Amino acid sequence: MAAPRIHFVASQAEPAGEAAAAMRERYGEYGLDEAEVIVALGGDGFMLRTLHRVIESDLPVFGMKIGDVGFLMNRYSEDGLLQRLGDARQVSLNPLCMEVETESGTSASSTAINEISLLRQTNQAAHIRILVNDIVKVEELVCDGILLSTAAGSTAYNFSVRGPILPLGTDALALTPISPFRPRRWNGAILPSSARVSFEILDHYKRSVSATADAHEVRNVTRVDAFEDKQIEFNLLFDPAHSLEERILNEQFR
């Protein structure tokens, strides 16, 4: 079996750049337009940026951790890369699509692999109406913000604000409030991945809110629509002994 054509990418951290240089010398490298697989060296943040950058290439990505956080990454080793790529298990992820309207009347859209989050921009609490499939579910949420998370992102920001961890393959999304004041007893919801969630910003001139899809932020939004985009699929590769599904499962027992 022929060795796969590899394209290496690395974060700006010096250790990642050094590792990429060593691996290029050892395994060779192809341009992105000729490659069959991308090997990303860095942490989770770099992995997310890589996936966003190569969204049009439709290439699988094998990440190796050289950074502080590596939930989406495999362990780093310069040895045995070809064998690891041959043995790797593929996990396919559908991102969220975010469509926003702003106070100035402009609109924008972006994708999120982890989560879409809405956050207050000032010292004033945000007032947000929440609709699911065009039906009002929360008339007025008074809060610091709210987020909608994929299963892959449920162990990240979502988990830090006490949202549920979602195993991969559950076809679910986590809707989690951030520091909610009212309704006092509402702790969020687990929604089917087919749900379309809309957020209407109430009193937005006084209580301004920003919306972020992973690292792409839009400020002064008045409405945000979020839904899973089945037309886009990211393919991540993992060592059999370090699968993403197993990592997500294990996080629930830590």
Image: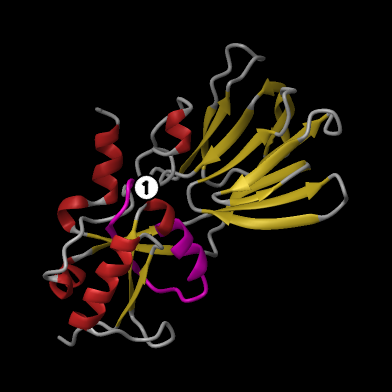
Q: Is residue 72 left or right of residue 123?
A: left
Q: Is residue 199 above or below residue 73?
A: above
Query: Where does the N terminus fall, quadrant-wise?
Result: bottom left
Q: Is residue 214 left or right of residue 209?
A: left
* Residue 19, quarter of picture: bottom left
How far from the left and from the top, in percent, is residue 107?
79, 55
Q: 242 or 206, which is in the foreground?
A: 206
Kindly tell me whether residue 12 is visible in this rendering: yes
Residue 5 forms part of the magenta stretch: no
Q: Residue at x 45, y 63 (%)?
A: 51
Kindly tell me whether residue 93 is visible in this rendering: no
Q: Is residue 223 left or right of residue 54?
A: right
Q: Is residue 18 above or below residue 136?
A: below
Query: Where does the C terminus fall, quadrant-wise?
Result: top left
How far from the left and from the top, in percent, is residue 8?
33, 74
Q: Which residues are magenta?
A: 47-69
Q: Is residue 110 above or below residue 19?
A: above
* Residue 7, quarter of picture: bottom left
Which residue is most to the front? 14
Q: Residue at x 73, y 36 (%)?
A: 209
How far from the left and from the top, in percent, is residue 66?
28, 56
Q: Residue at x 18, y 87 (%)?
A: 2
Q: Is residue 96 above or below residue 37?
A: above
Residue pointed to by mark 1: 169
What amino acid is at disc 1? Gly
Q: 194 or 223, which is in the foreground?
A: 223
